[in-house]
Amino acid sequence: MKVEILKESDIPAHLQVLNQIKKALLSEQSAVTELLIDTKNASAVLGIDQTVLEKALRQLEFQGLVRRKTEKSFTLNSDANANRYSARGVSSDKKEVHEVVDSLDRGLFPGAFCKITQDYLTGRKEYCNLTHSDGAGTKSIVAYLHYKETGDASVFRGIAQDSIVMNLDDLICSGVSSSILLSSTINRNAINCPQEIIQEIILGSEEFLQSVRDLGINVRSGGGETADVGDLTGTVIVDSCATAIMERKQVVLNNISEDLVILGLSSTGRSKYEMEENSGIGSNGLTSARHELLSKIYKEKYPETTDFNVDPALTYCGIYRLDDELPGSSMTIGSALLSPTRTYAPLVIALRKLLGKNIKALVHCSGGGQTKCLHFGKKIHFIKDNLFEIPPLFKAIKEQSKVSWEEMYKTFNMGHRMEIYLPYECAEEAISVADTFQIKAKIVGHTERSEKNRLTLINNTKEVFSYC
């Protein structure tokens, strides 16, 4: 195969190489295979810098098209399933992270949603510690676009909530019900993100924590850090770390067995403790959602919100502006993308008080979307065959991106972001409790015995998808 780099092109050299290799895979697979055997020799034969070739191959590796064999060689991945999400430099299932973490100590209760350790903080044998870190991800970039377009910095109060909820709801899934200490980290480009943005994030954090306390959950701020790191980010990153001490007997073990029902809690609508309608987007998949829906106008106006290592064809390739109407909804594209992540903590705590040990497992469908459940239980066949209607925002993303439904369900929650595993006879009572919080709940599936963990998902049009 031949590789030609156009020096006058706006596309980085390694992306030009990457795109030509992907094109060659369709007609010159043997030539690509030969290229992968020895990258040092291949770079000399092709007349391109070795670092450029290796950078292209590393991205192909991340996308799943090739696998590293040795330090200087790769091989084609026979199970390749490259997608637009990973091509943007993000991972929906974080497979490469799990491959490392899964080999480490899993804590006192390996099946729990979060890692749980002995009580190092107070030394009490009947207690345990949890520490969890997460953040709002690239949702903060959508807030940045809104701010630059309108001058309204208060939009970042929702981003503060996103960062907190991504920690709070993971802890709730592990059994924590109160007494949570939270610390926030804000990394910003001070040139693009002035003090008024920082002020809104801090005030938004305190405001949301107070609203959670008003619902009976004791969550307190332990301070935080603001760092000016313009070399690392073009806009702003909002992260949090939450710590809790709880009794070991309160841990939700996530002992998922056969013959349980999967109760899904809707991610859309307006709960009794929310101020406005929620689109259901949460804080996962925003890189994909932003680029698939929003117009290239934003790339031209705010280049600091893009990664120039990514194929330009995958950045801001949509048709919408933030203030355009979201089809099938009363929301705009911007308000839908910026819907603050809903916390299910008040409802989950109420259900645990009512149903106790009948709640066998709690799964927060965040990273990995509807496939998140595969990380829990052993030798379980998860069958989801009665899902919620797909929310308008996810329909719009699918329509604009043309990606498969299979990929959509791996990337987004697609209508429910919390799952409760419990006996069938408890489901009706749980649904009634959810109604009092104005959160729709329904049985979305059930569990069966299997030789290994796998998921069968049947969508609203009766298409069947299999994951393992």
Image (cartoon, rainbow, N blue to C red):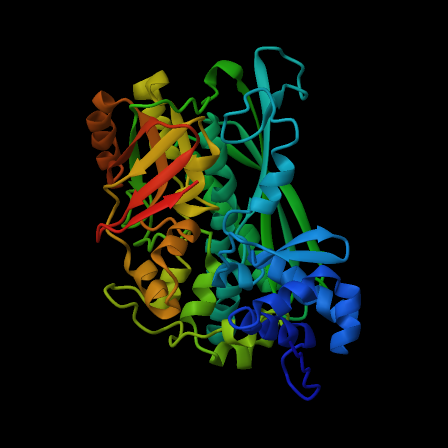
Q: Is residue 314 visible?
A: yes
Q: Quadrant of the N terminus?
A: bottom right
Answer left or right for 67 relative to 335: right
Task: Look at 57% across and 15% down and name the residue there.
Answer: 127
Quarter holding residue 183: top right
Q: Position of residue 52 (x, y in %)?
A: 73, 70
Q: Is residue 365 above or below residue 198?
A: above
Answer left or right for 227 relative to 368: right
Q: Is residue 189 visible?
A: no
Quarter holding residue 292: bottom left
Task: Look at 46% across and 54% down and name the residue there.
Answer: 158
Quarter holding residue 468: top left
Q: Position of residue 450 (x, y in %)?
A: 38, 28
Task: Look at 26% across and 51% down and name the residue there.
Answer: 463
Q: Position of residue 7 (x, y in %)?
A: 71, 86
* Residue at the extreme top of the image, as rendered: 125
Q: Position of residue 317 (x, y in %)?
A: 45, 75
Q: Nearer the viewer, residue 76 or 10?
A: 76
